[in-house]
Image (tube, rainbow, N blue to C red):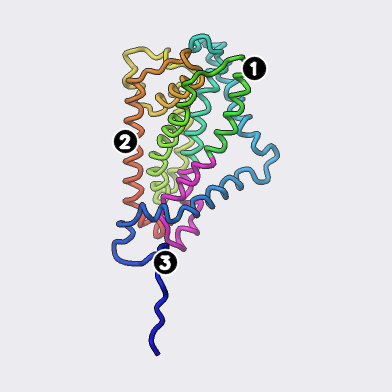
Amino acid sequence: MEPIHAPLYSDTIIIEPGRTEKNYWQDLWRYRELFFILAWRDIAVRYKQTVIGVLWAIIRPFLTMVVFTVLFGKLAKLPSEGSAPYALMVFAGILPWSLFSTSLSEASNSLLANANLITKVYFPRLIIPAATVVTALVEFAISFCMLLVLMVVYRFAPGSQLALLPFFVAVAVMASLGPSLWITALNVKYRDFRYVIPFLLQLGLYVSPVGFSSSVVPERWRLLYSLNPMVGVIDGFRWCVLGGDCPVNWSAFCISLAVVLLMLWFGIRRFRATEKLFADMI
């Protein structure tokens, strides 16, 4: 009897030496359905069996805005940007920071949370931390609705520069994805490293222009200050929302963008270098 040869379809994966390295980015597209499944699962789990549900995406940034407005605006009497109300300026800074911090914290622990999946089947592991970013984007979209409400309350209308907002949102996602890829690879090997992340995020909240304007930073410290990748993101986001009241220092933004791209390249490189060991270490 002659052997039966099954036809090879375009989505068939052939196991051969070096194929994973050679076709890694093609496999990312091939497993796009897994990406959407993991993203939807993370969203469902985040809001499942919660009393308030999606309102947490509004309550948390709103309470942070109230605290920062009292501390920096009322007690420290720091200036706002132009004619923009201080509370509105603070909320416009909280949104990109929340997107960054949520993406970073969720993606950093994503491999350990999906240990069973990693040890059973092959797929590009980069899908797992990338899928967690979708949850942060959903929360960002909900919080952005609150920002629109505040702009109506304060009678503050955005200008045409609002069309550039998706660009700064994309930069915020890249700023979080770079370090999170490196950190999640470290978490697989050193489990106690995950306890450092909340401390770093808390520290970053106060050294980033969330509760204050970048205009209060002395000129001699601007170069060092701009090395913080979130400086350019937050300043650009505020400019998109508040317009001329929050001008962007484009030189400082270019420095922050360069740091974001460098960290993204380094994060992908370190993740790819250790990816083949994840199943054994987990």
As drawn, is 168 to the left or to the right of 40?
Answer: left
Camera-side mark, 2 or 1 = 1
Give the numbered dot on residue 153.
Answer: 1
Residue 145 in the image, given as x and y percentages of width and height:
60, 28
Q: Amino acid at mark 1?
A: Val
- 3D distance between C-alphas at marks 2 and 3: 39 Å
* Residue found 42% across the figure and 28% down from its top: 230
Check disc 1 and report its element: helix, strand or loop: helix
Residue bounds of the magenta highlight: 107-135
Instruction: Inspect the magenta stretch and tell me whether residue 174 lies in it.
Output: no
Nearer-N-terminus badge (3/1)? 3
Residue 125 in the image, given as x and y percentages of width and height:
42, 53
- 3D distance between C-alphas at marks 3 and 1: 58 Å
Label 3 with label 1: CB-CB less than 8 Å: no
Q: Amino acid at mark 3?
A: Tyr
For disc 3, the marked residue is 9
* Residue found 34% across the figure and 17% down from its top: 222
Q: Within 10 angstroms of label 2, few (less than 14), some, or many (20 or more) residues?
A: few
Number of on-image labels: 3
